[in-house]
Image (cartoon, helix red, strand yellow):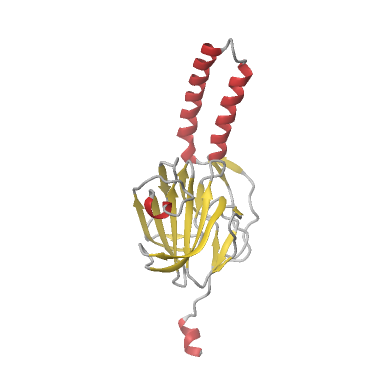
Amino acid sequence: MGKRLKKLKKIRLHHEGIRPLIGSAAVLALLGLVIYYAFSSYIPLYIFLGIGLTAYLIMVNFFRCPIRIFDGETENIVVAPCDGKVVVVEEVEENEFLHDRCLMVSIFMSLFNVHANWIPVDGTVKLVNHQDGNFHRAWLPKASEENERSAILITTPDGTDILVRQVAGAVARRIVTYAQEGEDCYVDEHLGFIKFGSRVDVYLPLDSEVLVKLNQKTTGNETVIAKLRPKNKPDEDAEA
């Protein structure tokens, strides 16, 4: 498709945050009034305002939804599905959907990261599966198998299966997945949203070239985390 548009730097709030932010503003205002009238003789007003405003701004930051357009070709490219830090890069056995050994790249999102998730590869959504579970801390290995999670299996145009797993954390209590089975999907599109602390796992073929390292920070829909090995097309095999 040629070069993409230059990255847009506009920032907006994700629609998943509208109700929580309105409710939080009301709760913080009410709580602030109660505490202020109960303890105003001991603590200055500006301290109450500072604490309440800081807490609210953290929530606003959490629900930011940057408008990002990937700047480059997307063929055989795997883009980071979220903002965060790489906490796992290892070979694993994925027995739930892929039933094969894979390379797993896991990105942990703290409360201070944007929690919007993006589609990491162009392709077709083959499967969407949500499972209830526990709420272990998101960076623990067992979180991928035991926590509440949503699995999205995407088949690229050349037939490579990529599994993306949204995993809830100790604080997260809701995973939202927009991808639907049978639909075409593309880099730049939103995959979903996870509320309040979580991680996203990406399972890749063993011959993939991983381009990120442990503890590296990623930017959703911008950082290239891996390159897929191109598959030979039928006509290429015939010529060989």
- Quadrant position of residue 141: bottom left
Whether residue 230 is visible to the viewer of this picture, yes or no, is yes
Q: What x and y, as percent, mark residue 106? A: 50, 56
| Drawn side of residue 212 relative to residue 182, left or right | right
> Looking at the image, which is closer to me, 77 or 182?
77
Q: Residue 44 at x, y = what percent?
A: 62, 15
Task: Give x and y (percent) for residue 24.
Answer: 48, 29
| Looking at the image, residue 56 lies above or below residue 7 | above
Res 179 seen here: no
Q: Is residue 228 above or below residue 173?
A: below
Give the residue at x 35% y 52%: 130
Q: Who is closer to the viewer here, 4 or 146?
A: 146
- Classify 128 as above or below 18: below
Q: On the rendered image, what quadrant is the N terminus found in?
A: bottom right
**Among all residues in the image, which is located at the extreme top?**
41
Residue in the picture at 37% in, 52% down: 146
Q: Is residue 197 left or right of residue 225?
A: left
- The tally of labels here is 0
Residue at x 51%, y 24% (from the top left corner): 28
Taking the image as shown, residue 2 lies to the left or right of residue 126, namely right
How far from the left and from the top, in percent, is residue 37?
A: 53, 11
